[in-house]
Amino acid sequence: MMDRGLPEEEVLGLIQEMRDKDFRYDRLFSTMCTIPHPIAIRAHDIFVETNLGDPGLFPGVAEVEYRVVRMLGEMLGCPDAVGYVSTGGTESNIQAIRSARNASAIRDGNIVVPESAHFSFDKIGDLLRLEVRKARLDRNLKVDLGSVEELVDDRTVAMVGIAGSTEFGQVDPLPGLAEIALDRGCRLHVDAAFGGFVLPFLKADWRWDFRVEGVTTITVDPHKMGMSTIPAGGLLFRSLQDMKTLETETHYLTVAKQASLTGTRSGAAAAATYAVMMHMGMDGYRKLVGQCMDLTRRLVARAREIGVEPVIEPVLNVVALKVDDPAGVRAALMERDWHVSTTRSPRALRMIIMPHITAENIDLLIRDLDQVLRSAGAGA
């Protein structure tokens, strides 16, 4: 740090120079985040200095968080759900598994997750000293229930199901997982970080949330398809007792106990989420999700026109395309300023159709993909 500071405009100029190095969202097909709704940005700014970690000093934003949790609970099939606004899916997943471990009193146990689980569960195994057992997937890339049953034992503190897998957008058979969980007396956590703001607004009635008996906790991220600002995650518990397993005494704050992982928490993220959910309503999200799914179908149709098939028919607005050498194709597309990603198994080219994606850019991307594949074929 310099002894004497710079003028405000000069500092802002430096900031803008660095911001200009970031890639534009309209070329990003690899991210599950998007440009926040304008009302979310305005609400974020209004509450930018508030701290949810000390709600006695900020009762207004504490009420905002309470209302967000109530709306999320209603959306996910349990109006009486409790929880809090987290920093995102990783924190929510950590806390969900931590609550299950604490409730079980098993300290050297295991968790059973699908092979498609987010990498946050590997972090969880390290942090909580739990063995992470990964169940195989079926041909549709859903977790195989038989594999889960083989892995669960009396040291299992939690099972995990995915509602909108990061790589393929697939939804695990949650009712079947719940039956196993109830039979084994085990908690079931649903990672719906992405799918939580998509599945409730599709025409098909997927049963994956708190309507399924046996689901104890759900991760859902408003800063993805919820159109809130970053970082705005959500962790919901079916019962207050489950959440209480996370409580720590906070001697010098305005509340006696705290269940969140972080102490200081941004009230701005909760306010942004409240504002956009109140403004959009269920109808607004149905329209938004419908538009993304229409574009998803467009991408698949255009890909088929150039002879490229999806790994599975898209369930959500996530597309994985079968191409030879996905990493090489990705690199070639990045040279053309298209930012896509790849999947692990099976290897494929992965694209997320977020609200910032347009039909025009889908057509341009497929045009360039066709050229890249033709060039690779000629080179071979």
Image (cartoon, rainbow, N blue to C red):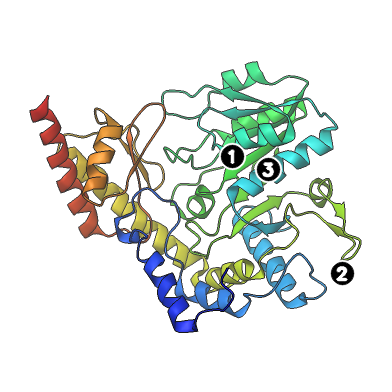
Quarter assignment of residue 147 = top right
Residue for badge 2:
254
Residue matched to label 3: 94
Q: Earlier in the sequence, mark 2 or mark 3?
A: 3
Amino acid bearing label 2: Thr
Measure the C-alpha gap from mark 1 to mark 3: 8 Å
Q: CA distance from mark 2 to mark 1?
A: 32 Å
Q: Residues within 10 Å of mark 2 (few under 14, many from 20)?
A: few
- Sequence-first disc among 2 and 1: 1
Residue sitting at 45 percent across and 75 percent down?
Answer: 38
- For the residues labelled 1 and 3, say whether their Cβ atoms are less than 8 Å apart: yes
- Horizontal and vertical percent position of residue 360: 20, 59
Circle 3: is it few (<14), some (14-19), or many (20+) Cα within 10 Å? some
Could you say which quadrant of the image residue 326 lies in? top left
SS label for mark 3: helix
| Residue 144 disc label | none
Identify the amino acid type marked 3. Answer: Ile
Q: Quadrant of the N terminus?
A: bottom right
Looking at the image, residue 368 lies above or below residue 143: below
Dividing the image into 4 quarters, which one contains the C terminus?
top left
At mark 2, the secondary structure is: loop
Identity of the residue furthest to the front in this view: 3
Of residues 328 and 6, which is closer to you in this image? 6
Does residue 294 appear in this view? Answer: yes
Where's residue 284, x and y in %?
45, 67
